[in-house]
Image: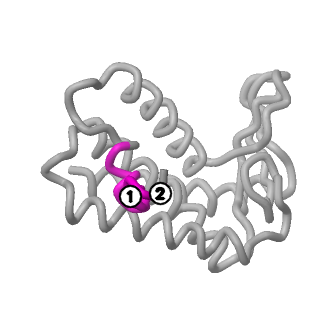
Amino acid sequence: MELLLTLLILALDQGTKIWAARALSVQPLVLIPGVLELTYLENRGAVWGLMQGWRFVFLPATFLFLGCIFWLYRKKRRDMTSLTRLILSLLVSGAVGNLIDRLFLGYVRDMIFFRLINFPVFNVADSAITIAAALLVIETIFVKKKATTFDLLEQCFPQKKKKPSDE
């Protein structure tokens, strides 16, 4: 089920990016005047356009993140709740969606603009990552008896245990 969700979000992300590059590159499409519009933007940075031109950092970091997620999924799937699997699917689809753009185009295609609050332009992949982040917060607050996504992600980067003589 997670694979199907991941592929569906990835297809939606790439499809909307292709459409936006063709249809919106000349003129934005105003959906709700003064509130919401679709516009085409090429982002060579990270979230909110920060770190412009840092592709050399984003690519290896994304591969490292995805490697960690796939390792976790392979080794710890039985320990995961349905919510954890949903969170990981959203994170993977968002990361891969923007990775495809960075690898093949050198930038990420964005198109959704909330003009009302002048929010930075974003895309479907960014939305998947944002939803996953919100679910991570909810999971951290409300899931007590089972391992959370953070607990599992922590296993990708085990900390060296201190010896009694180190204290």
Q: Which residue is mark 1?
A: 163
Can you tell which mark lies on residue 128? none
Query: Which residues are drawn in magenta?
Result: 151-166
Q: CA gap, disc 1 to disc 2?
A: 5 Å
Residue located farthest toward the left when viewing the structure as drawn: 78
Compared across the picture, whether 84 is left or right of 146 comes to right
How many discs mark residues in the rendered view?
2
Quadrant of the image occupied by residue 71: bottom left
* Relative horizontal placement of residue 66, taking residue 58 as reference (left or right): left
As displayed, is residue 42 above or below residue 39? below
Task: Give the structural element (helix, strand or loop) at label 2.
Answer: helix
Q: Is residue 79 above or below residue 148?
A: below
Percent coordinates x, y for residue 137 in the rendering = 47, 28
Q: What residue is rendered at 42% in x and 47% in y?
A: 90
Q: Front-most of 153 and 106? A: 153
Looking at the image, which residue is at 79% across and 33% down? 119
For disc 1, the neighbor class at 10 Å (few under 14, some 14 to 19, many from 20) is few
